[in-house]
Amino acid sequence: MTQPAIKVEDLSFSYGDIEAVKNVSFEVMPGEILGFLGPNGAGKSTTIKVLTGQMRPKSGRAEILGRETGRDDPEIQAQIGVCFEEKNLYLNMSGLENLNFFASLYGIKDPDAMEVLRRVGLADRAKDRVHSYSKGMRQRMMISRAFINKPTVLFLDEPTDGLDPVTSAQIRTTIQEEADRGAAVLLTTHDMFEADQLSDRVAFINEGEIVALDTAENLKLKYGERSVKVRLRDGEGVREEHIPLDEPGSSARIAELASSPDLMTIHTEEATLEAIFIKLTGRGLE
Amino acid sequence: MSLARIWKVLRKDFAMGPRSPFFLYALVLPIVLTVLFQFAFGSLFEPKPRLGIVDAGNSEITAAMEAAEGIELTLLDDAEELKRQVEANDLDGGLVLPTGFDEAVRDGARPPLDFYIGGESHASNRIILMVTALDSIREVEGSTAPVEVEVVSFGEEGLPLTLRLVPIIVFYALVLAGVAVPGSSMVEEKEKGTLMAILVTPVKVGEVLAAKWLLGLSLTFVMAMMTLALNGALGSRPLDVMLVVLIASLLTAMLGLLVGVVSKDSTMMFGIIKGAGVILFAPVLWYLFPSWPQWIAKLFPLYWIIEPIWQVSVMGEAVSEVWLELVVALAISAMMLPVIVALARRMQAQMASR
């Protein structure tokens, strides 16, 4: 049976008296993308910091590839790739120099840094210093740096935060490619669209606790309402009607409206992850 | 701890060095100070008087001028070329000694002698050349000076000011290259977040600290040796000088590391360097004012590295004469190590919780 790449059991962490992560448990399997969805300050980045060995947990256990984290274990560190929320690149070095330097820290003798840059669309700017890069280009550099060691486990902290839709889409494609290669991906985001599109499973985290963890589809089925929205002409205006699918007589009502000459559009209504998050926590994702 | 990983971080720091204003400042300032001090107090811009001679008869005057200290002699074959060089201010003065000149002087024939003087030459250089030439001619004639001059010196006997200023320049080389460069390199990595990026790779914090320390150590060693060489203060025991400079570099690089781990940002680092600068600089004053009580200088940490450098490089002492100072310097460095390790752990926790 395949072992989880990331295994977290009852993990807690506090900043002084403030409990940032409370008894969190989850697993991420190889090739799986787990979306950590929650608002700012929910405990997403703290969880990543504990898992990447930057901080030691107050209690509980966190394992990467079967080995406990937070023990300055170079073998574990060699297997992970991290994309920080903060764009911490060497601005006075070129993109290529940045990647070659980090590849050398992993002991990679002949890194194919140009190929990695090509994947994120930066090959033509490889020799330019990073300080001349735009925000989107720097973010793509961050992603490429996380990939340089072909990691088994990837931690991506808000990888598309504040980017334009085109750059965000490019980054999502490369993340999916890494998962397809077999990497376990822990993706933190407060973008419900990104979480929905990329994640195999989604964990809702709020005030340091996981309040729901399942596939996006199951969450929608479990917490959403199945309904149909029908729009009809009403004299000079438009009238909308919401018909819950699980109520008796709904099929007959839908058939009646569908045959109406006033019918304009008819759509199924799915709950969004954000709506479910609000339903579960009473707060939004922003 | 992996030497390979330390080397990779160190190599990156050296490669990035020329792109860092601080690194360049550390390289340039000791050289600039040397030139400035030599200009103000030394003889860098007071070149020796330059004399050209066309000697057709193998004169003893030429040999005497050649032997004279403080004169730069150029021998030429052609009188016209001599005149041209004097006129162009390539020479301060020129003599044309014809065949049989020495014999004519000895016979008391009072032969004519043309002494060409450059119009742009310094008056002091002209006087030196003319007096020295006349003295040589008098020696050829066989006569002696009509008086005996007794030289009596007044004022404090001591080393020239240019040598007493050497500790100041060496101090700047040590503090800039040893303290400011590794300190600022560490702080910049923290501020930009690149240290955190390094620490999620297999590199450990101890390896980063070792690389920064080696950066300071090697740069300080090179800059201090270069500064001493530029000031003509390498002494007669270069290996001894290298040893004391190495120990001095070791201590200052530890100080740099300490400043680097304790400072949260550049503002704090510059504040510490400015605040501690007085304490660091204090022992240098005792070389400018040697009459001050020496025991006070020993209260300051850098005394224990500047004194050995002074004794071995300037005063020509053997390293065995300064072993106590060197042991104290090594002890100070050793005491700093556990403090740096403890502060580095705190630094790591602070960075992660940002």
Image (tube, coloured by chain):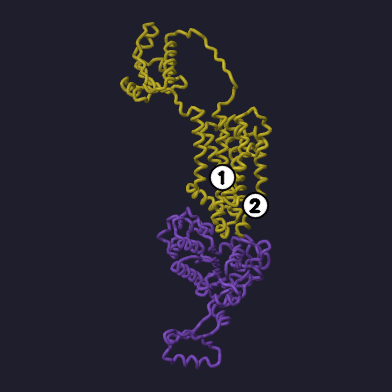
Q: Chain letter for mark 1, please.
A: B
Q: Is residue A183 visible to us here?
A: yes
Element class at badge 1: helix
Q: Nearer the viewer, residue A93 or B318?
A: A93
Task: Classify B228 as above or below A52.
Answer: above
Task: Classify A71 as above or below A199.
Answer: above
* Quadrant (top left/top right/bottom left/bottom right) for the C terminus of chain B: bottom right
Local crowd size for mark 2, using a 10 Å CA cut-off: few (<14), some (14–19), many (≥20): some
In the rendered view, does A112 fall on the left or right side of A11? Answer: left
Estimate the x, y position of residue B265 in percent, counting from the top left.
58, 51
Mark 1 or mark 2: name the one nearer the start of the chain: 1
Q: Quadrant of residue B1?
A: bottom right
Residue kind at label 1, given as amino acid type: Ala
Task: Classify A235 as above or below B209.
Answer: below
- Residue drawn 47% across the image and 54% down it: A93
Q: Which chain is purple?
A: A
Q: Label 2, on which residue?
A: B343
Q: Label 1, on which residue?
A: B180
- Residue drawn 62% across the image and 31% down it: B286
Estimate the x, y position of residue B298 in percent, counting from the top left.
67, 35
- Residue drawn 62% across the image and 29% down it: B289
Residue kind at label 2, given as amino acid type: Leu
In the rendered view, does B322 fall on the left or right side of A190? Answer: right
Q: Which chain is yellow?
A: B
